[in-house]
Image (cartoon, rainbow, N blue to C red):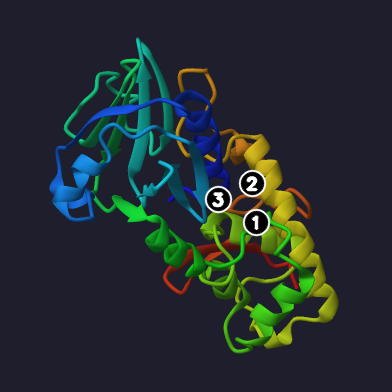
Amino acid sequence: MPELPEVETIVRDLDRELKHKQIIAVEFLDKKVFQSPDQEIKNIIGQKIKAIRRRAKMIIIDLGDSFLIIHLKMTGQLALQTGKDFIVGGHPIINQNRRLPNKFSRAIFKFNDSSILFFNDVRRFGWIKLATSAEFLKFDQGLGVEPLSFNFTLKYFRQVLSARPRTTIKQALLEQKHIAGIGNIYADESLFLAGIKPFRRVRTLKTEEIKKLWRVIPQILRLAIKRRGTSFSDYVDAQGQGGNFIKYLKVYGRAGEKCGECGGLVKKMKLGGRGTHWCDNCQK
Ligand SMILES: [Zn+2]
């Protein structure tokens, strides 16, 4: 699932291309994708895009008085077609066949400059919702602090952790209602950089360890955004750029390989149902 850096990358690309454009038509090829009442579809048509932003792992299309919230989940993709070019974010669906719509296309948005945004999804877990300003506020308030915002203070981080002493530190990092946007990749990588084993209970962490973890989380997220996130395939988008942060991953997806720091083997286990990677030597 795309995490904060991957969604941030998509959002920045789309914001640059779609800002100020007007939606002239919307089609849901798969009704399940649109999770608001069907009659609300007509409220999208004619709206101008004010901005495209990210909240947690979701893409927010700001229409001024209302908001489209898009979650790509495991296999969702957004592909913006302008002429023959594509800007693609999320799951690499269209690299096999650069013609859209295809059998995975679930929604189509057409714009006044004849560009088209396709929402494609293989497994159909992704969704789109239309929210009023009040609904959006409620949604926003239900999500945790953004780790790249000023609100992600050491004090806040300590509070979040001290409220769940028996949870493993990795599971605490994944809790979206406390800290938004961190998923499996960046939880494992942050814990590696902080030198903390992912399955340690929160109450066993020393003050210095918590401080180090708090410090490395924004660092790794910023670095990943700079590298356009992590993509697990060799596709490139219309600008010839795929997310290349995969080269910089220290433990995630590297089970059985040598740790770049100590030469020991990177280990893997299931923790709360998630594949979890760590180095026994580098992490205490
Ligand atoms: Zn190591």
Query: Residue 224: image x %, image y %?
Result: 64, 42
Asked whether the beta carbons under mark 1 and mark 2 sit within 8 Å of each other, the answer is yes
The amino acid type found where label 3 is placed reads Leu
Query: Residue 236: image x %, image y %?
Result: 47, 23
Image quadrant holding the C terminus, namely bottom right
Q: Earlier in the sequence, mark 2 or mark 3?
A: 3
Q: Is residue 279 toward the left or the right of residue 178 in the image?
A: right
Q: Earlier in the sequence, mark 3 or mark 1?
A: 3
The amino acid type found where label 1 is placed reads Glu
- Kindly state the secondary structure of the residue where label 2 is placed: loop
The amino acid type found where label 2 is placed reads Leu
Residue corresponding to mark 2: 249
Residue corresponding to mark 1: 189
Query: Residue 207: image x %, image y %?
Result: 83, 80
Observer-nearest of 182 and 68:
68
Mark-to-mark CA distance, 2 and 3: 15 Å
Mark-to-mark CA distance, 1 and 2: 7 Å
Q: Is residue 235 visible?
A: no
Residue corresponding to mark 3: 4
Q: Earlier in the sequence, mark 1 or mark 2?
A: 1
Query: Residue 180: image x %, image y %?
Result: 55, 62
Asked whether the beta carbons under mark 2 and mark 3 sit within 8 Å of each other, the answer is no
Name the residue at 57% across, 40% down: 229
